[in-house]
Image (cartoon, rainbow, N blue to C red):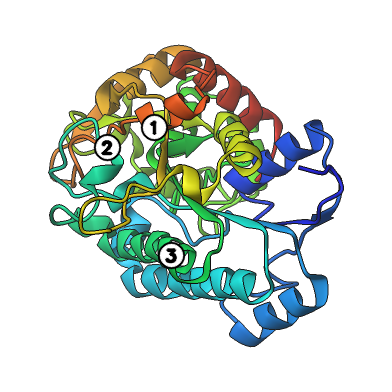
Amino acid sequence: MDKNVKIYIAGHRGLVGSAILKSLREKGYSNFLLRTHKELDLTNQEAVASFFFKEKPDYVILAAAKVGGIIANNTYRGQFIYENMMIQNNVIHQSYINNVKKLVFLGSSCIYPKESEQPMAESELLTGPLEYTNEPYAIAKIAGLKMCESYNIQYGTNFIAVMPTNLYGPNDNFNLETSHVLPAMIRKIHLAKCIENNDWNTIREDLNKRPIEDVSGSSSEEEILDILKKYGIQTKDNVIQVEIWGSGKPMREFLWSEDMADATVFIMESVNFLDLTNVIEKKEIRNTHINIGTGHEISIKDIAELIKCKIGFSGHLWFNTEKPDGTMRKLQDVSKLNSLGWKHQIEISEGIDRIYSWYKQYAD
């Protein structure tokens, strides 16, 4: 690829998009189209069409999405399916209309059935029912994947769909109302340690950077303790306790976001749709998407204990079995990606050190 090609990154300020932008810059690319949500609402069909007609990007990376953890997915089901499908439909269709050379669409490992064979190969798609709590989001991502595949087949486009596993890293979401499991545990255990140490200065600094609902560092101690209790951080029998949803038994695979970015750039530079087709006797082309992950998994209990150890919290982790576990296993088969020539670099222990260091240094 020419280093001067015009690249549009949708969602460039998010967890994945910011890492992709950083990776591209490090590789010498410099001609970027970047728009914030305020500058370009990707759910607005007319606005997206106008943007593509005017700017004519050569390459598109679609990392923009409405995302959240198990609470947000299960609560805002209508928003999750509507907003994600609108974003995808507009960006993918306008990429076709305006002759984009290649598009990389970022999906999610939640596209696979709840009871998938483990590890989940790309061929597991649409072989069974989805996990209920994030079904609307998963259906939206399946639709985006199939839209890319279908446009490639009918129109000869070069749109690649990739399915990353659970991601974490710089610019992650630490909002306890909407965050995914790993950043939520890091923040909760960090705040619990501060309470344990009676370190109110650090607690107030944290809440000034990242208020919880309407509670900031300027709120009273009583207000702060009440909001932390609401999100599972409290003192019980003179011991600081952190609530973790579910039994702790579910297994999860975690990928450092900058590894994900490196994989995305690798695919943009080196992989084309025709490299991924699998035409069988009935001339059917399907499952051309690519899993991106580590191929390793860890239980929620073990990662919570690892975070507890890294942060130095000596209190109690309470696994609330009245709350949902979600899918019990979500390990992706990454053999397709490995065979194409890419493998992850950052293991989970090093990743926890990196993300905790970033969390303490930066605000959202």
Secondary structure of residue under mark 2 = loop
Secondary structure of residue under mark 3 = helix
Residue drawn at x 31%, y 51% as measured from the top left = 279
Name the amino acid, label 3. Ile
Number of residues whose C-alpha sits closer than 10 Å to that of mark 2, classed few (under 14), some (14–19) or many (20 or more): some
User: Which residue matches tag 3?
Assistant: 153
Residue drawn at x 43%, y 54% as measured from the top left = 68
Residue drawn at x 41%, y 30% as measured from the top left = 254
> Residue 237: image x %, image y %?
24, 25
Examine the image and state in which quarter residue 3 appears.
top right
Q: Nearer the viewer, residue 119 or 56?
A: 56
Name the amino acid, label 1. Lys
Q: Nearer the viewer, residue 33 or 222?
A: 33
Residue 358 placement, left or right of 183: right
Examine the image and state in which quarter residue 19 appears.
top right
User: Which residue matches tag 1?
Assistant: 336
Q: Nearer the viewer, residue 233 or 130?
A: 130
- The answer to whether residue 8 shows anywhere in this view is yes
Examine the image and state in which quarter residue 362 appears.
top right
Separation of residues labelled 3 and 2 (CA atoms): 22 Å
Separation of residues labelled 2 and 1 (CA atoms): 9 Å
**Label pair 2/1, CB-CB below 8 angstroms:** yes
Q: Earlier in the sequence, mark 1 or mark 3?
A: 3
